Image: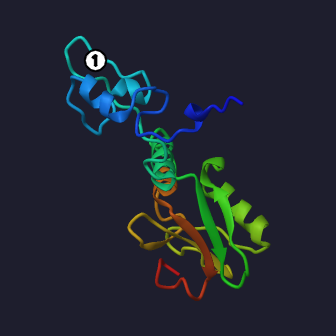
Amino acid sequence: MDLNLKATELRLGLPGSDEPADQLQSSSSHVKNNKRSCSEIDGSCQKQESGAPAQKAQVVGWPPVRSYRKNVMEQQKKPDSDGSGFVKVSMDGAPYLRKIDLKLYKNYFDLLKALENMFKCTIGVYSEREGYNGSEYAPTYEDKDGDWMLVGDVPWDMFITSCKRLRIMKGSEAKGLGCL
């Protein structure tokens, strides 16, 4: 009966080597440290001609996904300097919010018609002297500074770059915002 005790024997040597640990220590002439060399890790790390090590590969899972997505979104927004894109629209008395893309509209008239159709209300026409006088609702927006202003107070191009969100409020509440 031939038992292969060598295969199941417990020893202190490295896996795959037939030498015991004490023979390995005496035969190795290099100084031992606990760090692996680049070639042991992935085989792709080599010294450059200048003597400096090559750039390390990015560690998997770092940076966290949230930061990564945030950075990607900021990079995508930078080329689009012509508008803020989607903004939320709320209306006093409506139980829901909507989101619209300001880039789809060419001027205030198109935007106001779309808002009237979306919320089934009448907004009226804006005039610099009277604002939205005579209409039940007045469209307002929050700019980058956090100030609420009447839609139509600034030129269209400035509006689409500074608008953060829209609110269609009752005309009686919008009295302090403009000429109403």
Q: Toward the viewer: 121 or 128?
A: 121
Above or below, 167 against 87 in this view is below
The local crowd at label 1, few if under 14, some if 14 to 19, many if 20 or more residues have their Cα within 10 Å, is: few
State the residue position of label 1.
47
What is the residue that sits farthest to the bottom in this orientation? 172
Give the camera-side residue of 144 and 2.
2
Please name whichever residue, 26 or 158, is drawn nearer the observer in this view of the structure. Answer: 26
- Measured from the top left, where is residue 44 in percent x and y? 41, 21
Identify the residue at horizontal 31%, vertical 34% (top origin).
Answer: 22
- Residue visible at 59% across and 61% down? 87
Callout 1, which amino acid? Answer: Lys
The secondary structure type at the circle numbered 1 is loop
Quarter-wise, where is residue 120 in the image? bottom right
- Residue 94: quadrant of the picture: bottom right
Q: Is residue 165 above or below residue 22?
A: below
Instruction: Find residue 130 and report its horizontal and vertical position in percent.
Output: 53, 75
Q: In the image, what residue occupies the spot 42% across and 73% down?
A: 147
Picture coordinates of residue 60 (x, y %)? 48, 42
Residue drawn at the location 31% of the way across and 23% of the way down: 54
* In the displayed structure image, the side of residue 66 where residue 91 appears, left or right: right
Above or below, comparing residue 84 to residue 177 in the picture: above
Q: Nearer the viewer, residue 138 or 18?
A: 18
Quadrant of residue 126 in the image? bottom right
